[in-house]
Amino acid sequence: MNKTAAMLALLTASLVACGGSNAKNIDGPWTGALRLPDGVPLEIFFVTLTQESGSAVEVSGLEFNGSWPVSLPP
């Protein structure tokens, strides 16, 4: 799994956990971090989310900043 796919899977799982409400509270900039067990950030991502109609979400400005390898070992 490559770096982008892994981060998008993590982002999707995080956003699904936030669901369940009809309020439009997802709009705006979001930041997330994948940390090592000692708390050191391994990968940080920045993204802007905009809820469209229904459950559709527009993702823009996705950026990664970290030292995670491009591809992970199996």
Image (spheres, rainbow, N blue to C red):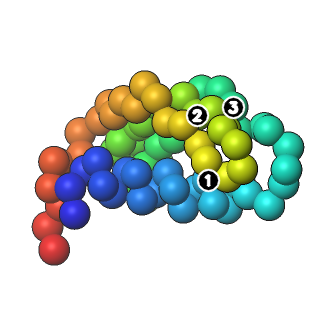
Which amino acid, mark 2?
Answer: Leu
> For this rendering, which residue is in front, 58 or 12?
58
Tag 3–tag 1 contact (CB < 8 Å)? no
N-terminal of the pair, mark 3 or mark 1, is 1
Residue 58, placed above or below residue 38: above
In primary-sequence order, the first of circles 2 and 1 is: 1
At 54% from the left edge and 29% from the top edge, which residue is drawn?
48
Mark 2 lies on residue: 49
Label 3, label 1: how far apart the Cα atoms are = 12 Å
Say above or below: 59 vs 34.
above
Q: In this view, does 57 lie to the left or right of 23?
A: left
SS for tag 1?
helix
Q: Which residue lies furthest to the bottom in this view?
A: 74
Given contact means CB atoms under 8 Å apart, are the residues at marks 2 and 1 in contact? yes
Name the residue beneath numbered marker 3: 27
Q: How crowded is mark 1: few (under 14 residues within 10 Å), some or many (20 or more)?
A: few
Q: Do the residues labelled 3 and 2 touch (CB within 8 Å)?
A: yes
